[in-house]
Amino acid sequence: MDHFRRAGDLSGGAWAHLFASGAYTMRGDLAEAVAQSEQALTLFRRTGDQAGQGWALATLGIRHAHLGDYERARGYAGQALEVTPETGDPTVLAMAWHARAFVHSQLGEQREAISCYRQALDLVGERKHPMARGVLVIMPRRRIIILASVVLVLIAGVVAFVVTALSPSAAPAAHGAVRPLNGTGTGTATLNLATGAETADFSGHLPPLGAETGYDQGTLTLTGASTFTYTGTRTVLAANGDKLFSAISGKGTFTRTTAKATETDTITGGTGRFAGASGTYTDTISFVVVSVTGSIQTSHVTAVTHGQIRY
């Protein structure tokens, strides 16, 4: 990219940023991937390259969907569809439809995803590039009916793809992409001081789940005058209704009115797009006691999450 900048080649620099976005995505650094795509879009707009703008906008739609920011993802995918028809290039327009389809699929909107993928695949047929390759997977009804990916081949700035049918049993979710799982949440926890039984309800924003809610069930054990451990299970409900399941274990310290804990969680699967999901994440948690009624203690909870998920 420095080479293009020194040479004053804005177009070459734009494509370099766009390719870098893909590299950062493969490394799991989605924030930097978004930044690279944004720089590419800025340069494409400066040069008036509408095809490049289409690619950059579609890429931003996909990246934001990975991050769970579906409102922005829809916006960028929509802009890509507005720009690309003017290019006259069916491959670029197919990429825009691919971006829209990907957003729908992440939200569990299966019919819309299928419709958009078919739009993309119809356009692909116009190119018939020999290097192109894609995948179409239709899962049984009442399960994820997601068209599992149109694979993009980028060679010298030219991208094209065609379709090959796979059986529904192919490509299980556990072999999917690794995505960062970072976010925050708040909630309410109740603890039975007599038995150690604990429950919690929470909400927050946790890409790639988007806005999420959930609940924990567990058992807390005192290990000292001011220390404790606990184990349990967690169910997280994603924005589109898909569920993510985890086994949780943690330890911490407490006073009469507060507690702090560090938790290690193992993803055990889920429903919808999280069927077969795997990964681990840690939660740094703070508790503030708000009431004690009999043996039931109620606390306000805040948590910061860092980890990875594969699906």
Image: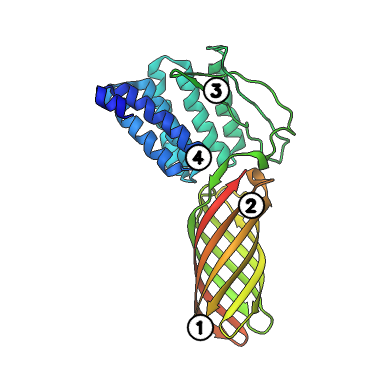
Q: CA distance from mark 2 to mark 1?
A: 34 Å
Quadrant where the image shows the C terminus: top right
**Residue corresponding to mark 3:** 119
Distance (Cα) linking label 3 and label 2:
29 Å
**Viewer-nearest residue: 158 or 79:** 158
User: Residue under circle 4?
Assistant: 27
Label 1 sits on what residue type?
Answer: Thr
Residue 278 drawn above or below residue 216: above
Q: From the image, tell me which residue sits under label 2.
A: 243
Q: Determine the image quadrant of residue 78.
A: top left
Q: Residue at x 37, y 30 (%)?
A: 17
Task: Return the x and y of residue 181 as percentages of the image width and height.
Answer: 53, 51
Residue 304 point in image, percent of width and height: 48, 61
Helix, strand or loop for disc 3:
helix
Q: Is residue 186 visible?
A: yes
Q: Residue at x 71, y 26 (%)?
A: 166
| Labels 2 and 1 touching (C-beta < 8 A) | no
**How far is the residue under mark 4 from the one under mark 1?**
41 Å
Q: Residues within 10 Å of mark 2 (few under 14, many from 20)?
A: many
Q: Is residue 146 above or below residue 223?
A: above
Q: For the residue labelled by badge 1, is the local secondary structure a helix, a strand or a loop?
A: loop
Q: Looking at the image, is mark 4 or mark 1 earlier in the sequence?
A: 4
Of labels 3 and 1, the one closer to you = 1
Q: Which residue is mark 1?
A: 255
